[in-house]
Image (cartoon, grey):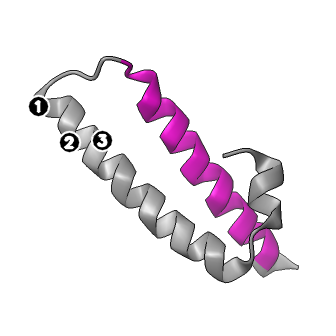
Amino acid sequence: MKQSEIKELSTVELQEQLVSLKKSYTDLKMAHAITPLETPMQLRALRRTVARVATELTKREVQ
């Protein structure tokens, strides 16, 4: 998910997106611990997307 896509979402949608992304990151991390993923770069991409969404939420709270 790109930053421009994140900025277009509403605050409620961002909160829902953050919850679902964190859950999918946790699931993917557990799956990787059991059997290695074909592309471990998925973990990095998902972690960074979670950070982008969380940053946008924080930025909106400050304003």
Circle 2 — which element?
helix
Do the CB atoms of the residues marked 2 and 3 lie less than 8 Å apart? Answer: yes
| Amino acid, disc 2 | Met
> For the point 70% across and 59% down, which residue is it?
55
Instruction: Check residue 28 in the rendering and tell me which mark sits there, or answer none.
Output: 3
Circle 3 — which element?
helix
Q: Residue 28 occupies which quadrant of the picture?
A: top left
> Mark 2 — residue?
30
> Mark 1 — residue?
34
| Amino acid, disc 1 | Ile
Within 10 Å of disc 1 (Cα), the crowding (few <14, some 14-19, many 20+) is few
Task: Look at the magenta stretch and give its main secondary structure.
Answer: helix
- Figure quadrant of the C terminus: bottom right
> For the point 74% across and 44% down, which residue is it?
2
Q: Residue 36 occupies which quadrant of the picture?
A: top left
Q: Residue 29, percent across and down?
A: 28, 40
Measure how far apart labels 2 and 3 are at the Cα level. 5 Å
> For the point 74% across and 63% down, which residue is it?
56
Above or below residue 34? Residue 55 is below
Do the CB atoms of the residues marked 2 and 1 lie less than 8 Å apart? Answer: yes
